[in-house]
Amino acid sequence: MGLVASILLNHGRRFGMSDDLDWARLPEPGDPAMVEWLENASCSPRVKALAVRAVNAAGKGVSADRWRTAVLAEHPEAGTLLAEAKECMRAAGLWPWPKS
């Protein structure tokens, strides 16, 4: 299990999400600021998982709109979480699409 999955699952236990591996199967963030944010942010584990997915998608040239559409196709209930992820990431200066 990678660092991101470990962080999310450990923090997720506090929220009763001990086996939420669908959200935790994520690429490792290459940015040390992102890793620090994942460890310390008060956002929920699912919001943190979306943050990692956002950074990964942006790094591959995917637009914010395409990323949101893909996440909602996979997790239709994630609309509120997407907004929370954007807000949390913007507050930390980590939102990868500054013009969206």
Image (spheres, rainbow, N blue to C red):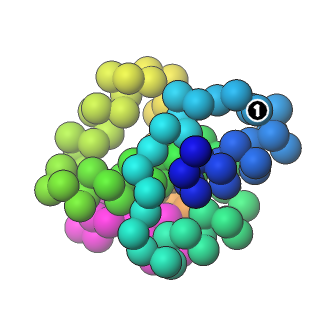
Q: Residue at x 43, y 21 (%)?
A: 76
Residue at horizontal 70 percent and vertical 28 percent from the top? 19
Viewer-proximal residue among 42 and 20:
20
Q: Position of residue 16 (x, y in %)?
A: 82, 32
**Quadrant in which the N terminus appears:** top right
Q: Amino acid at mark 1?
A: Ser
Q: Is residue 40 above or below residue 17?
A: below
Residue 85 in percent (x, y) is at: 51, 52
Residue 4 vs 65, above or below: the answer is: below
Q: In the figure, is residue 37 to the left or right of 52?
A: right
Residue 55 colored in magenta in the image? no
Asked whether residue 91 is in view, the answer is: no
Image spot of residue 69 (x, y percent): 27, 33
Residue at position x 67%, y 66% from top? 39
- Closest to the observer: 1 or 96? 1
Quadrant in the picture for residue 4? bottom right
- Residue under pointer 1: 18
Q: Is 91 one of the magenta-colored residues?
A: yes
Residue pictured at 42% horizontal, 74% vertical = 31
Question: Magenta region: which residues?
Answer: 89-100
Asked where in the image residue 17 lies, by quadrant, the reply is top right
* Element under disc 1: loop
Secondary structure mostly taken by the magenta-highlighted segment of the chain = loop
